[in-house]
Amino acid sequence: MGTRCANSISCIKDLSGRFMPGLRGEFSGRKIDGPSFAVSIALPKVLGEKTDSEKRIFVDLSTQHLWSYEGPQLVFDFPVSTGKWYPTPTGDFNIWIKLRFTRMEGGNTALGTYYNLPNVPFTMFFYNADYPKTLGYGLHGAYWHNNFGHPMSHGCVNISVENAERLYAWAQPQTTDNSTYATEINPGTRITIFGTTPAE
């Protein structure tokens, strides 16, 4: 059972999904400019018309890869980065909220793992009975590295910004604003995470 918030400092505080301009970030001792590209990205349009029960996302920790399906049809297939400094949970989950942007902060300065990342794009927080919503695990775009296919996160699933935007547009709940909660009539897509993260 998960007991540590995935973003141990910020956790889940701001669910507005708003872009916050002019912010700088930090990742493992390296200063990073916040994403200026995000200002011009239009809200994505929902690509699929099938029901959520036919949409599934699979993440294999062993191969650091994600696949998504509508029924038997493969829709997306790309590398990701999962937990290096803290494990990504395994099991079946559902997306409970989608945020256009959010801040993520955690890690440890003394260990060189501190991060403070403004405007993390296309975040899809997920949960199940063992990992409740308050723990803040999610799929999201990562603008601070380009090492997809290798563990790089503190527990979330990092995706290239381009692939995260496409997945965000496709996955349920259907998105019409900066912040969209899953509901009974607009449920969240199911995510299955399996395998063992390789030691690197």
Image (cartoon, rainbow, N blue to C red):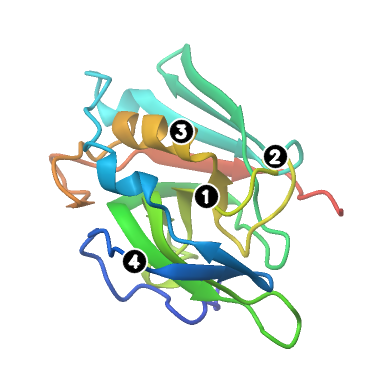
Q: Is residue 91 left or right of residue 85?
A: left
> Which of labels 2 and 1 is toward the front?
1
Q: Is residue 110 left or right of residue 52?
A: right
Question: In whole angstroms, how far apart are the C-alphas of marks 2 and 3?
Answer: 17 Å
Disc 1 to disc 3: CB gap under 8 Å:
no
**Residue 1 in sight in this render:** no
Q: Label 1, on which residue? A: 143
Amino acid at pointer 3: Glu
Considering every residue shown, the one lying at the far top of the view is: 73
Q: Label 3, on which residue? A: 162
Q: Nearer the viewer, residue 104 or 22?
A: 22
Residue 128 place in picture, x, y as percent:
43, 57
In the depicted structure, whether residue 20 falls above or below residue 147: below
Badge 3 marks a residue whose secondary structure is: helix
Q: Which residue occupies 14% across, 47% down?
A: 177
In the depicted structure, whether residue 82 falls above or below residue 48: below
Question: In whole angstroms, how far apart are the C-alphas of marks 4 and 3?
Answer: 22 Å
Amino acid at pointer 2: Gln
Could you say which disc has been placed on residue 64 in the image?
2
Amino acid at pointer 4: Gly
> Which of labels 2 and 3 is toward the front?
3
Question: In whole angstroms, how far apart are the C-alphas of marks 2 and 1?
Answer: 17 Å
Q: Label 4, on which residue? A: 22
User: Which is nearer the N-term, disc 1 or disc 4?
Assistant: 4
Question: In whole angstroms, how far apart are the C-alphas of marks 1 and 3?
Answer: 10 Å
Badge 4 marks a residue whose secondary structure is: loop
Q: Residues within 10 Å of mark 1 (few under 14, many from 20)?
A: many
